[in-house]
Amino acid sequence: MALKEHWRSGLGFVLAAAGSAVGLGNLWGFAYRASQGGGGAFLLLYVLIVLLVCLPVLVAEMVLGRSTAQSPLLAPVAAAGEAWRPMGWLFLLASCGILAFYAVLMGWTGHTLVHALWVGLPDDMETAESLFASVSTGNSALLGQGGSLVLTAAVVASGVQGGIERLSRWALPLLFVLLVGLGIWAAMLPGAMGGYQTFLLRWDPAQLLNPTTIRNAFTQAFFS
């Protein structure tokens, strides 16, 4: 019987877990959801939901996987019996949905990166809209999505240590550097402080009970 592959180190697991949580949703999603009127109330709700809902769910998933040493499909059965098999199928369905969603975003990102390196990024709205249309429709979109699925399959096929952990060890530090650089660049843009005060630092207690703000906070928390 073949032995199951394990993480080489705790750091590799932490980096992989962080990489699965921190992604494009934190870049484009957070900005536009925070700008829809929630301000400081949105930030407070977001932090509370992450701590009180998302973090316990994440810990429960980790405990379930570690205690049963089974795949997401079989872990509920191993932990609580055959009656919980539908939960395993739900885990699998959710994973397929997330993969389908992020494969599209990976294709867009990869195409835009190639365009930025070879041609440059547009500096006006009309050209930017034209670029996005070419990236997100037609054969370009299909090629990008297919390429992202092939790359994902290659990493997974390489195993936990040789694929996922190895990629996480250089991709996560690179992501951190990019986020810091992006934050510094954004803070130096004209009107940046006014934007922070309007969209992030403004406090309106009524927004704590606003259904739109609550929904946006839940959505962003689960994307995080």
Image (cartoon, rainbow, N blue to C red):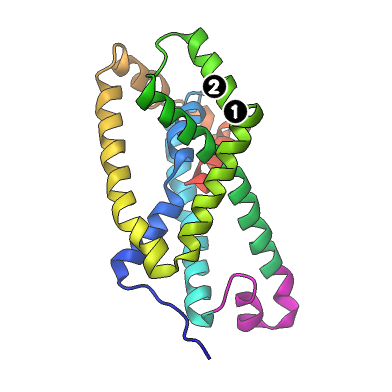
Seen at 52% across and 33% down, the residue is: 108
Q: Does the magenta segment cover residue 75? A: yes
Q: Does the magenta segment cover residue 66? A: no
131 vs 75: above or below: above
Q: Secondary structure at mark 1?
A: helix
Tell me the kind of residue under disc 2: Phe
Are the two marked residues, 2 and 1, in contact with CB atoms closer than 8 angstroms? yes
Decide: few, some or many residues near mark 1? Use Cα within 10 Å; few <14, some 14-19, many ≥20: some
Q: Which residue is mark 1?
A: 136
Give the camera-side residue of 140 and 211: 140
Q: Main secondary structure of the magenta part?
A: helix
Seen at 46% across and 36% down, the residue is: 110
Give the camera-side residue of 60 and 73: 73
> Which of the 4 quarters of the picture holds residue 23?
top left
Q: Secondary structure at mark 2?
A: helix
Seen at 65% across and 63% down, the residue is: 92
Q: Which residue is mark 2?
A: 132
Q: Residues under labels 2 and 1: Cα distance?
A: 6 Å
137 on left or right of 161? right
Q: How many numbered marks have been drawn onto this rendered protein structure?
A: 2
Residue 76, percent across and down?
63, 75
167 vs 62: above or below: above
Residue 194, percent across and down?
33, 15
140 vs 85: above or below: above
Q: Please provide the residue range marked out in magenta.
A: 70-87
